[in-house]
Amino acid sequence: MRDVAVVAFAQSEHSFSDLGWTEADLVMPLVNEVLSVTGMDRSEIGFTCSGSNDYLVGTPFSFVAALDTIGAWPPIAESHVEQDGAWALYEAWVRMQHGDIDAALVYGFGKGTIGDQVGISSLSYDPYYLAPLVPGHIAMAGLQARALKDAGFDVDPDPTPPPATDGAAAVILAAGEVARRVCSRPAWITGLDHRIEPHAIGSRDLTHSPSTREAAARAGVRPGVVDFAELHTRFEHEEVLLRRELGLDEKTVVNPSGGPRKADPIMATGLIRIGEAAARIHDGSAQRAVAHAASGPCLQHNLVCVLAADTASDLVSEGER
Amino acid sequence: MTTQASSSSQAAQTSASRASASQTSDERVVHVLEFPGGYTRSTGPVIGRFLTGLRSGRLFGVRMPDGRVLVPPTEYDPQTAAALGTADEDWVEVGPAGTVTTWTWVDDPRPDHPLDRPFAWALIRPDGADTALLHAVDSGSKAAMATGMRVHPTWRAERTGAVKDIACFAPGEGPAEVPALVPAPDGEAELEPVSMVTLPHRLEYRLRGGTVWNHFIDGMAVGQIRGTRCAKCGKVFVPPRGACPGDGVPATEWVDLPDTGVLTTFAVNNVPAAGAPEVPFISGYVLLDGADIAMLALVSDVPWQEVRIGMRVRGVWVPDAERTRSVKNLKWFAPTGEPDVPFEQFEEYV
């Protein structure tokens, strides 16, 4: 695998009420901030990928408006996922493995304050068996919380949702020497994987998260000390389950940023986990950190990213010395 | 900048009135995203067969390769992706009573929920099944709910072959009587197997226009079209944008634009649409004098046969007394009678 690092991270001052921000208002300052921090020019960005959800604002192709912020004319290489920006980062990371580009820009944004989140989340469920009932994300979380409680976990079986939030985040990924040039302490991505569980919620064991477990194994969370973990826990009961499936021990500090319970700019929340974990490496407070992003009801889809101050090859060459 | 339209941009006034947003700018407006009639989806053979069973007041599951029974069924095994339900003997009638495997309480039901009083969502494993389906349980109170409790489905008379054919689940073994289908079919054989479902779709939003939009709409309220200019490339965008799509920097300098311009392209519309003018109507792109992007507008006061690319046009506004804070103040563009603009002069903007 090519060595790719998070070299810059920026997030908005999130808002818990609609301030009339457009997509461009949310994203543009962050894009300019990560470019400024790295000293990079837009022309050095070989690929741009964003994550958002048009249903949040109820405007088809609303993500296109955000393209105004990145200088998309003349045309650039650009892609979008209708998912959290963490999956946009995954696409950019895969794209960088092709070897022909050295830097990528990733951003995610969402306005959670203006829409009907129960209605919107229900539309993302199975359209035959689940969506017609309009259960929504809070009830889905409640089913998992109750299942965990029944299985003996010390959790509140009646979960409360995180605050509806407007916000955005941006990250620059860079490879090899470019990363070392633009960042004094790059947060190298030593492992990145995502796995999903069945659509049929009633066929899942909600007291386990096999997708998290497998993604963690493939991303190489273990062995090794994990100083910090940023977890996409929109509901409190999810932490205990994720800790177990990720194999984190008590020494790992979870969500030092405050986590999604403090601010949940939907579609950026997962990307912020990666950015926050990277920032702990940038500022020297961590050698190794884990970020997690989730999507779908009851942690259906899980992404695990392992970040370290040293690349795998650094460690090998140190051993040789 | 070599075109006629751009050369006149020097003449366009720069507005210093950016902060003079109207007093109504803070109002939240309701936006509705609706697909009248809902989304229709084909069910495929397996989901269709299950929904056909619901219409008859019966629950069916399919056997998975490991011998377990999947309810509600899918065309594929959730674990191995093997095809399911292709043979009649793979289908198993289950329930109707079942066991709650987990649940959560709803204090404030929504209008689109199955029940109009507090209820529980529950995953319910019907007898004979190895997986659970989601539905509402009408237990009366949260205290009456428990994991492991026994419940049974109650059925609507108006059954269409949809998951809401089950009104809800009720505590106890049941079974509840399955009411005769309303409207009554001519006979069971008259009913085709279920092959489609329709999902109603309506979402409401309450939002504020951004500062850029508000300033634009305040201008439209007094018959003034406003654009924004990029400080880097100098291009003028209308309707205004807060960022230059070319440079990715804020475009915050306001420019008052005239309501005259050139028609860069157009279409004669013969297909009636909700909210659109009577056919045939003409829609087109008008490059306002001083703007660097053409705006979509209606063209009228001219026989459709006489509309030309390059035609000079001027905005036609609703009378002052009828103006509202809306883009609809600008009714359409009409020919000015000036000579046409040569194509080379606006080619860049087509």
Image (cartoon, coloured by chain):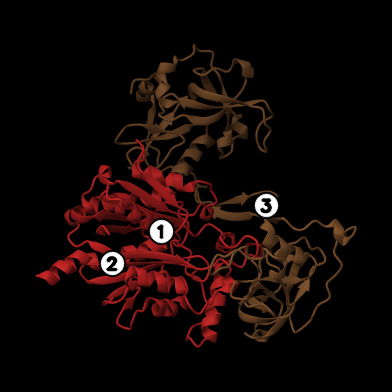
Name the chain under label 2. A
- Residue ID at (31%, 56%): A171
Q: Position of residue A8 (x, y in %)?
A: 26, 57
Evaluate if marks 3 and 2 touch, with contact meaning CB atoms under 8 Å apart.
no
Q: Nearer the viewer, mark 3 or mark 2?
A: 2
Q: Position of residue A33 (x, y in %)?
A: 28, 52
The correct choice, above or below, for A54 with respect to B60 in the image is above
In the image, farthest residue toward the bottom: A152
Mark 2 residue type: Leu
Q: Name the residue nearer the viewer: B86 or B179.
A: B86
- Residue ID at (85%, 70%): B179
Name the chain under label 1. A
- Residue ID at (61%, 23%): B300
Name the chain under label 3. B
* Mark 3 neighbour class, 10 Å CA radius: few under 14, some 14 to 19, many 20 or more: few
Chain in red colour: A
Q: CA–CA distance between discs 3 and 2?
A: 45 Å
- Residue ID at (26%, 59%): A5
Q: Name the residue nearer the viewer: B59 or B105.
A: B59
Residue marked by disc 2: A307
Chain in brown colour: B
Residue marked by disc 3: B38
